[in-house]
Image (spheres, grey):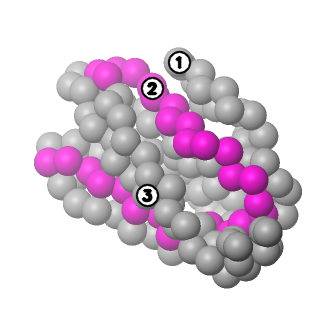
Amino acid sequence: METKGQLQTILYSGTCAALSELTLVPPMIRFSFRTKRFRIKYALNTNGTLRIKFFLSLDPEAPSSGEPTGTNLFAERGQITYIVGDDEWIELEHEITTLTLNNWLKLHAENLDSFAHTVLAQVTIERLEDVI
């Protein structure tokens, strides 16, 4: 049985081509949850050109250009809607609760650079209900 309070980590990995966008869609989350921590890896010489956003969505669609449907989780609590970095792991404690079932937690990357960049990220969520 999976229990309330259990933490799970969602992993994201891909390559965002030069001057393009990429949406990564992990499997559906079938239970209500709270985000706890976001970790994003930026390679050396990314120089703030790779913008990472996370969207809570009710569909699994991954558009090849433009943002996916849903709510930008960083826009919900502040002025910054994306995270950038260079040669570092960015780690954010950021809690957003969703009580609805059957959601997708999508990562959207926008590469403003003329070089491709690897996308590596993790989101830790906390289960808000027991599942038998």
Q: Which residues are magenta?
A: 17-44
Disc with the residue nearer the chain's start (3 vs 2): 2
Q: Which residue is mark 1?
A: 64
- Give residue 128's position: percent from left, percent from top: 76, 74
Taking 67 as reference, is 53 above or below it? Answer: below
Q: Which residue is mark 3?
A: 122
Q: Which residue is mark 2?
A: 21
Residue found at x 62% / y 77%: 6
Residue 50 in view in this figure: no
Left or right, residue 65 beside residue 70: left
Indicate the secondary structure of the residue bearing disc 2: strand
**Disc 1 and disc 2: Cα gap in Å?**
7 Å
Which is more toward the observer, 47 or 53? 53
Q: Are marks 1 and 3 in contact (CB under 8 Å)?
A: no
Residue found at x 40% / y 21%: 20
Residue found at x 15% / y 43%: 45
Most extreme residue toward the bottom is 5
Kind of residue at badge 3: Gln
